[in-house]
Image: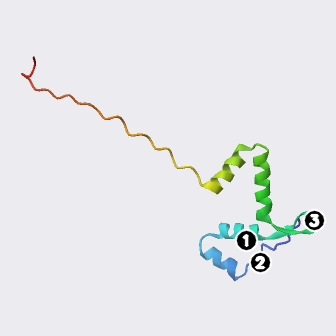
Amino acid sequence: MNDTTNVDSKNDDQIGSWASGRPMREALLAGLEQEVDGVEGRRVRKLDLLVNVLIRKGLAGDVSAIREMFDRIAGKPAPGVRPPPEPRRFIVSWKGDEP
């Protein structure tokens, strides 16, 4: 998996991502879309390689990998909602009402 991407040269798109304030996100997305030589000489995206690693870890029993996959597929569970407290009971009595 040789990757000969030149990270020193910036084209107009890369300069624009710096201006947008999200250069790391843009660089990661671009890097994950790059293709490398895969099995049997086929080209495969780096993103696909990472997904396969995550799946293999999950199948091997890595709970954090399993949790990550389910969080990405179904979304993170909402925080638990506490049931409302039981209503309070007040007893009101007036002086002189005693039997």
Mark 3 packing: few (<14 Cα in 10 Å), some, or many (20+)?
A: few
Instruction: Give the label on residue 40, or none.
Output: 3
Q: What residue is drawn where x is 59% and y is 71%?
A: 21
Q: CA distance from mark 1 to mark 2?
A: 14 Å
Instruction: Give the label on residue 30, or none.
Output: 1
Where's residue 50, x and y in %? 77, 59
The tag earlier along the polypeptide, 1 or 3, is: 1
12 relative position to 96: left or right: right
1 relative position to 8: left or right: right
Compared to 90, does 82 lie above or below?
Answer: below
Query: Which mark's residue is nearer the viewer, 1 or 3?
Result: 3
Three-letter code, disc 3: Glu
Compared to 52, does 85 lie above or below?
Answer: above
Three-letter code, disc 2: Ser
Where's residue 73, x and y in %? 65, 56
Q: What residue is drawn where x is 74% and y is 44%?
A: 62
Extreme bottom residue here?
Answer: 12
Kindly state the secondary structure of the residue where label 3 is placed: helix
The tag earlier along the polypeptide, 1 or 2, is: 2
Residue contact between numbered discs 1 and 3, judged by CB atoms under 8 Å: no
